[in-house]
Image (cartoon, grey):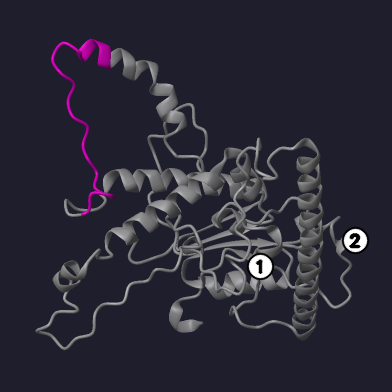
Amino acid sequence: QDGGKMSLMGHSLGSVIVWDVLSVLRESLEGKAPRGTADDPIRIDVPPSPPPSGDESRSESASAATAGLDVLQGTKKWGPPLHKKMDKVIPFVPDLTIFLGSPVGLFLTLRGAHSAFDELRAVAEAERASLIPCDDEEVEVLGGGSGKSNEPPPVFNLSPIICSPFALPTGSLYNIFHPSDPVAYRIEPLLLPEGVPPSEFPPPAFLSPDGKTIRLHTKARQVGNELFRQFGGLSSLIGKSVESSAESAAEADRATREGGDASPMKGGGAQRQNLSGLVRDRDVSFRLGGPSGRVDHQLQLGVIDNEYVSAVSAHSSYFGNEDVVDFIIHSTKPAGER
């Protein structure tokens, strides 16, 4: 009211409740606002056609039979599996949403949300592809490449969309966790394409009040982890190459003895898609995170913190953590006072 702002914060299972509340709000807002225009057939909302005469009773019975399924699927795979539709939603869109020690990533995995996020990415790529001209005539229609104009032809982005465009109705979202918290899970890996190896997941951002201050010992540990990851990836690549060569040689030897086809794919099923290298050395930005572009934020450990000892009290340490308190105070201040 009067230009004020609201924020939401959830700890542990409370963050799951906050996620589900925002998911229901997202569906409510999308249902009220038409998407796309008549010129955009991919995103246009087409109202359902009325049933033919004589089929009203059959249509009503079919609707009654599937009412429960419609409610369960009403908030997609990332929302709560409701058995009764929620008639009321929160009357505001939060400016800031904070998760502390959140198991939301686990719940989303169990709900199968990863594939739903991938579907949104595929739709976004299809929408972008529909705007790219197929020939010179379409380029001229868009205002570029015409012989009567000296303007250069338009440049179209053909790089793949890496991060899912999924977002919740909130100004920004921060998933803050202690690296030793056994209950906390990351969310960003679910917004990347299925098939990206865990070794290539972008490391979480470090939490700081202004988003820039990182302590010296944290930077040193970050450099060490990056070197370990690079050397670990190199050794893993060599190991996989040796293993693949050994398997190919064994398959060829077996096929030679049996007089069959030496193709390793013979009789085999579809292999899981491997997207190794898709995210490596790329800057990722998640729409879910808001202006920061990141969702997962890790607490900075102390100089002599022991990760195994910290695991005992990590899940209950957020409200007493100075970085968390400073971040909340800094983030809820008016923009002119930060």
Q: Quadrant of residue 203?
A: bottom right
Up/down of 149 relative to 91, above or below: below
- Residue type, mark 1 in image: Pro
Is residue 286 on the magenta stretch? no
Dot 2 alpha-carbon crowd within 10 angstroms: few under 14, some 14 to 19, many 20 or more: few
Sequence order check: which comes first, mark 1 or mark 2?
A: 1
Residue sitting farthest toward the left: 148
Percent of width and height locating residue 27: 38, 44
Amino acid type for the residue under numbered disc 2: Val
Q: Is residue 298 above or below residue 108?
A: below
Residue behind mark 1? 204
Q: Would residue 22 be visible to someone looking at this image?
A: no
* Foreground of the two, 274 or 305: 274
Quadrant of residue 63 in the image?
Answer: top left
Secondary structure type for disc 2: helix
Q: What stretch of residues is rendered in magenta?
A: 40-59
Q: Where does the image place residue 122, in percent across and percent down from the top left?
A: 42, 52
